[in-house]
């Protein structure tokens, strides 16, 4: 599966557009992480607990989007984006979305 934020690929032609695909996850903070994060916010610097949580969320959303694309026969996803929003106090949604396409290698 080829993924890109671009809307076209230099080495491939898009031969069919299959439509929007997306994957999402909603994660909540963990009390233990919050204690460490709050301490880190007082001192300053990167809040590693939340950085890790967001990285895990992005990967899970990306994996779910790729599975949806494979399910409709896609070879790639173009125009890949991520979006996040707060669902409630302490819970956020991470969404990955793009356009599923069928690709053909360009002949040179």
Image (cartoon, grey):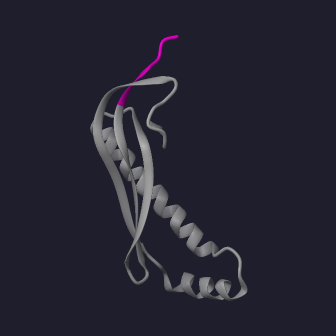
Where does residue 89 sit, x and y in percent of width and height? 40, 84
- Of all residues shown, which one is farthest toward the top? 108
Q: Is residue 90 above or below residue 52?
A: below
Q: Is residue 102 above or below residue 19?
A: above
Point out the image quarter for the N terminus.
top left
Where does residue 53 sit, x and y in percent of width and height? 52, 69
Which residue is nearer to you in this view: 4 or 26?
4
Where does residue 99 sit, x and y in percent of width and height? 35, 41
Q: Quadrant of residue 90?
A: bottom left
Residue beneath the point at 52% across and 26% down: 10
Q: How many marks?
A: 0
The answer to whether 52 appears left or right of 59 in the picture is right
Residue 2 belongs to magenta span: no
Residue beneath the point at 42% across and 43% down: 79
Residue beneath the point at 43% across and 65% down: 84
The answer to whether 74 appears left or right of 105 in the picture is left
Q: Quadrant of residue 60?
A: bottom left
Q: Is residue 36 above or below residue 57?
A: below
- Of all residues shown, which one is farthest toward the front? 7
Q: Which stretch did the figure color magenta? A: 102-108
């Amino acid at each position: 599966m080829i993924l890109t934020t671009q809307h076209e690929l230099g080495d491939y032609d898009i031969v069919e557009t299959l439509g929007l695909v997306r994957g999402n996850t909603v994660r909540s903070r963990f009390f233990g992480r919050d204690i460490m994060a709050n301490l880190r916010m007082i001192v300053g610097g990167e809040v590693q607990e939340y950085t890790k949580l967001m990285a895990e969320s992005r990967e899970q959303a990306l994996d779910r989007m790729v599975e949806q694309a494979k399910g409709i026969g896609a070879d790639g996803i173009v125009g890949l984006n991520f979006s996040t929003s707060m669902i409630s106090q302490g819970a956020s949604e991470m969404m990955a979305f793009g356009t599923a396409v069928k690709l053909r290698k360009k002949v040179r």
